[in-house]
Amino acid sequence: MFFHIRLERNLQLHPRFFGPQLRDKLVEKLIHDVEGTCSGRHGFVVAVTGVDTIGKGLIRDGTGYVTFPIHYQCVVFRPFKGEILEGVVTLVNKMGFFAEAGPVQIFVSNHLIPDDMSFQSGDVPCYETSDSSVRIQKDSEVRLKIVGTRVDATEIFCIGTIKDDFLGLIGDPTAGA
Amino acid sequence: LQEVGAIARRLVLNSSLLARLVRLVARAFYDDEIPHKGANPGKSGKSDNKGISVVVLDALTRRQWVKEEELAKRLKLHPKQLRRTLRVLEDEMLVIREDHKETTKNAKVYNAAVAVADGEQQGGPANEKTKALLHSYCCLDYAQICDVVRYRIHRAKKMIKDELEDKNTVQEYVCPDSGCGRRYSALDASRLISPVDMNFHCERCDAELVANNDKLAPKDLGEGNNEENARRRQREKLKEMLERMEVQLKPLTDQLAKLKDLTPPDYGSFSQWQERTLAQARGDGDGDHKTANGERPSVPMPFLGETKARVEVAFAGSDTKEAVKEDPGKSMKVLPPWMIRQGMSLTAQQRGEVKTEEGASSDTKPTVAPTMDEKPMSAERQLQEEYVKAYYAALMLQQQQQQQQQPPGDALDEVKKEEPDQENGFAAIAGDRVVGVKSKRDDAEDDVEWEEEAPSTGLRSPISFASIAKLC
């Protein structure tokens, strides 16, 4: 799920940037450092929306670098157990398939795929019902439910299921633009 | 007294319910052989120890704290075998074990305690030969047994139910390589994927991983139409298993339900139990214990030999000051007043305030010295309080009768002489305390003592105090 939160970070700036564009440089550095990263606690930082305050810089001993504490606001994405997401299938395997919902990767094992769908290997591996009415292959869109998350310091990985009602394939890769 | 009887009955009922539970559990789950640990797996058919735990657990329901060697002797088992069994049972959380380094004397104390608990008589110092060895004691832990059994049954049922409802979500993967055998969870899936063939590979040996289906998961019996049938069959098998389990466990679950509200008896740690039973022994006035004077390590001033506690009793005048029964086997000696100093932490027993059991009340547990720390469960305390009340009532009655017989303010001698005779039957010693100078002095001391201790022990007959005061 997406959240809009306020975070803090200490940025180190090289003296060559000390000039009239100091603040802009700081913001640029912040965006460069933070966007796209993931912390276990907050989730993936999607975008920085604004900078609240930039504190007074502290010169580090020995080097000329200066440390600025920055408070900023950003949009983060963090998946939770029990959440329902749509994702795109990236890899199909006889053990299950991998899907991506934005920055987070979700694995659906074959144990959590409905019993009537079975793995078909071949040049295009996929999961298919016996009458081929539903086929899940690479680049299909699926709706899945998250049943477990593994949160490291800098990474989040999820396990999902499509075995419940209203889950499963929602978009064919062939149809639509 | 009726209430006391009711409580006593409830206690007994309690233990019989619990004993039954333990026996049921033993026969239900521990019927098979004890697994051999370590070097020699399976003693080449020399001895088949199938069902040994049943025997051991049954024996333990009849005893409280037991020395392992003694248990082995009684059960005619090899002590090593018994020890192994007890170790397994301890791991299963059914039994508590404690180890004590003991000297000969303490062993005798232990024997006394056991004898009391068993209601037997020990003729003479039985096991003199016990040296300063490490003795192991074991006891059934009823409170834990109830909880543990209930929890395990719940878990077993949950496992089957979850599988039926498909709650097993996180898959496990095992490396089939015999040397490796590493297990992975589905949560690790992202780093197990191999770029080459799009399958999961072990991190160490790079063998292809296999999904770990435990027996409850639906088996992969091939693809196509068979699978649906297979899964349905699997579900039915699980349901049937669940039903069968419930039916077979029914007597056990019933027993557990009965016990749910009752608190199980807590024998405390071994040393507490020892203290308690010995106090009981003393209180019972059971003079049959011939075990030698055990030194009580916890007592600050061990008192060897028989005490002249009778002296104290006689002076204080009659039975409000409870007579201390002279037990050759008791370990808590009554300290006469000239030994009592300020600030000595003595139990009420040592101050000579223990009540003895008279012929009248025939109930089980007398009061244990109130300064002892861990009290057994509340029912026991209740029992004791009831007993105390009953005892006091009986005493009061008796005293009043006595007062009617002799006019108050009579020579204290007669009272002195009579009381000990009545209570203790040690006429000889009491008779020697004729009125003399010395006795009077002691008397005075005693009075001071008594008055101090009066408030602590509750009921006191005002009449006898008056008579004492007169003499001063």
Image (cartoon, coloured by chain):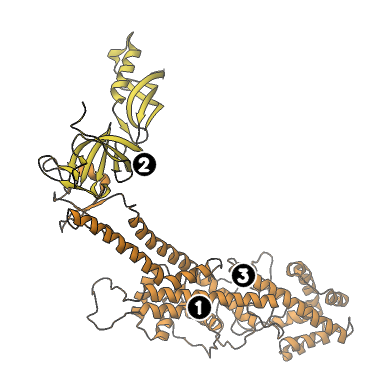
Chain colours: A yellow, B orange
Query: Where, quadrant-wise, is the C terminus of chain A in this rendering?
Result: top left
- The mark closer to the camera, 3 or 1, is 3
Q: Secondary structure at mark 3?
A: helix
Quadrant housing residue A53:
top left
Where is B295 relative to A106, above or below?
A: below
Q: Choose the circle earlier in sequence order: 3 or 1.
A: 1
In the depicted view, which residue is nearer to us: B111 or B359? B359
Q: Residues within 10 Å of mark 3 (few under 14, many from 20)?
A: some
Kindly identify which residue carries mark 2.
A81
Q: Position of residue A129 (x, y in %)?
A: 20, 46
Q: Are marks 2 and 1 on the same chain?
A: no
Q: Are marks 3 and 1 on the same chain?
A: yes
Give the amino acid type for the residue marked by disc 1 in the picture: Asn
Number of numbered discs visible in the structure rendering: 3
Kindly identify which residue carries mark 1.
B106
Give the amino acid type for the residue marked by disc 2 in the picture: Lys
Residue extending farthest top: A20
- The mark closer to the camera, 2 or 1, is 2
